[in-house]
Image (cartoon, rainbow, N blue to C red):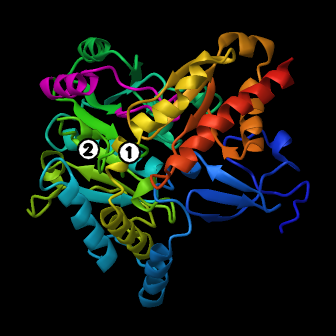
């Protein structure tokens, strides 16, 4: 058991440290769809940690792959002409799964890394094809693309950009659910100035917002017509969350770039990958003397141990048939949550596309208590459910190995947590 001491110097992301200090929840172990705290209490990990533990926790296959790689080659960089076997193999496998044959794969340490890479690659592509003025980036309201420089700027959650001064630009945002507004923005800025449009297939941290019917196909066509690169941010959507390898491949589109992370190792070791269509990467792969070099990269890009974990993860997905689970479980999850729509504290339930969902509290709940989401998260924890707080409610994205038992926990535990919340607010 870990004894928590007030004043511990650990600084948590996205946390009110005054409230956290002395009130940390220390997770000590995980197995399958469950984790345990330092008091020995078991919880259903209903968000797969931070949207990433797609095959659950404690998989011996990953431990073995990492251990073997550490003994063989613990680390080495990919800069210049260096390479390592796990990175080469993982790049080949990811490229072979991509919607566009012949795609290139650029590794980073996580999703935010490869979002920034995508922004720079988009601009560099146009620079080296004679259109250096195409630098403008477009994001969507409520979009989330990590917290690095470009990701913060392109992201559409306004609170995440407050207090940091000037961010990379030029950047603009369009409503998340309107293809027409995207085209109007491209025309207004000037297609000759716009480099890329960033789009999550299903918006995750911004509220689990599902795209309207036909939206993905429409924005892909608009980008193609105006020669704007379509960047599909599949950091959350990928590796089975929507029932396909990358999430975006659930629609008949071919993005110019795809960002993935999280599920590529099931969160066991930080790793991200940018998948780049051949036409975008072509200026850097001519093989001609003096060809441009992408002067960008992370120290741990293609780390052999992380890539060994990635290869073992892909093996797990294939062996256990986990990738289709996101589609197979989307209706059972929606059914498990359907009863919540009638609860007096609930404003909206969003589910039905992939194995993720969100439940918003009603506006009058916030009028009564601005901290209602945090109180509800704590009430859910008391019911044995670990949930992800959003601006208006709670999100869930369980491990793909979850089944009827875990869905029953949500169907019974969430109403009880709302009843607990009602008593707190009374």
Label 2 Cα crowd, 10 Å radius (few <14 / some 14-19 / many 20+) = many
Left or right position of 383 against 186: right
Q: Work out whether residue 391 can be spotted.
A: no
User: Residue 419: x, y in percent?
Assistant: 76, 26
The residue depicted at 15 percent of the width and 29 percent of the height is: 224
Nearest to the eye among marks 2 and 1: give it. 1
| Location of mark 2 (residue) | 257
Label 1 Cα crowd, 10 Å radius (few <14 / some 14-19 / many 20+) = many
The residue depicted at 58 percent of the width and 30 percent of the height is: 161
Return the residue found at the far right.
6
User: In the image, which residues are magenta?
Assistant: 199-225
Q: Is residue 296 magenta?
A: no
User: Residue 273: x, y in percent?
Assistant: 35, 56
The secondary element bearing badge 1 is classed as helix
Q: Quadrant of the N terminus?
A: bottom right
- In this rendering, is residue 360 above or below 290? above
Q: Work out whether residue 360 can be spotted.
A: yes
Q: Nearer the viewer, residue 360 or 269?
A: 360
Separation (CA) of disc 2 from disc 1: 22 Å
| Location of mark 1 (residue) | 326
Q: Quadrant of the C terminus?
A: top right
The quadrant holding residue 9 is bottom right
Q: Nearer the viewer, residue 220 or 386?
A: 386
The quadrant holding residue 314 is bottom left
Which mark, residue 240?
none
The secondary element bearing badge 2 is classed as strand
Of the two numbered discs 2 and 1 on the same chain, state the one appearing first in sequence.
2
Left or right position of 352 against 100: right
Q: Nearer the viewer, residue 158 or 407?
A: 407
The residue depicted at 60 percent of the width and 39 percent of the height is: 410
User: Residue 155: x, y in percent?
Assistant: 47, 31
User: Residue 117: x, y in percent?
Assistant: 36, 48
């Amino acid at each position: 058991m870990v004894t928590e001491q007030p004043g511990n110097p650990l600084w948590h992301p996205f946390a009110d440290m005054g409230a956290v200090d002395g009130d940390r929840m220390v997770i000590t172990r995980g197995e399958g769809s469950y984790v345990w705290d330092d008091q020995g209490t078991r919880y259903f990990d209903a968000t797969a940690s931070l949207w990433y533990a797609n095959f659950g926790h404690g998989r011996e296959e990953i431990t073995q792959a990492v251990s073997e790689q550490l003994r063989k080659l613990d680390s080495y960089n990919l800069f210049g002409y260096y390479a390592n076997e796990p990175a080469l193999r993982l790049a080949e496998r990811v490229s072979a799964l991509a919607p566009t044959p012949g795609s290139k794969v650029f590794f980073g340490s996580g999703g935010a890394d490869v979002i920034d890479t995508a922004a720079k690659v988009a601009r560099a592509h146009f620079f080296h094809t004679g259109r250096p003025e195409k630098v403008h980036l477009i994001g969507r309201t409520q979009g989330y693309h990590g917290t690095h420089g470009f990701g913060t700027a392109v992201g559409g959650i306004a609170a995440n950009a407050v207090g940091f001064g000037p961010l990379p630009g030029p950047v603009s945002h369009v409503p998340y659910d309107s293809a027409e507004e995207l085209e109007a923005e491209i025309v207004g800025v000037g297609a000759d100035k716009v480099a890329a449009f960033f789009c999550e297939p299903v918006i995750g941290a911004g509220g689990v917002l599902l795209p309207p019917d036909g939206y993905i196909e429409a924005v892909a066509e608009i980008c193609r017509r105006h020669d704007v690169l379509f960047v599909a941010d599949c950091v959350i959507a990928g590796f089975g969350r929507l029932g396909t390898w990358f999430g975006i491949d659930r629609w008949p589109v071919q993005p110019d770039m795809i960002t993935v992370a999280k599920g590529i190792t099931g969160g066991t070791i930080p790793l991200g990958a940018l998948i780049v269509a051949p036409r975008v990467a072509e200026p850097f792969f001519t093989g001609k003397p003096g060809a441009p070099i992408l002067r960008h990269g992370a120290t741990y890009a293609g780390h052999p141990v992380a890539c060994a974990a990635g290869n073992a993860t892909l093996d797990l997905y294939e062996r256990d048939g986990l990738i289709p689970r996101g589609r197979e479980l989307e209706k059972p999850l929606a059914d498990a949550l359907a009863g919540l729509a009638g609860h007096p504290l609930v404003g909206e339930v969003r589910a039905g596309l992939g194995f993720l969902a969100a439940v918003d509290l009603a506006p009058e709940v916030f009028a009564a208590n601005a901290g209602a989401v945090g109180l509800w998260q704590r009430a859910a924890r008391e019911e044995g459910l670990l949930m992800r707080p959003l601006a208006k409610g709670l999100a869930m994205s369980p491990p793909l190995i979850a089944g009827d038992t875990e869905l029953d926990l949500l169907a019974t535990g969430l109403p009880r947590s709302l009843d607990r919340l009602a008593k707190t607010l009374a």
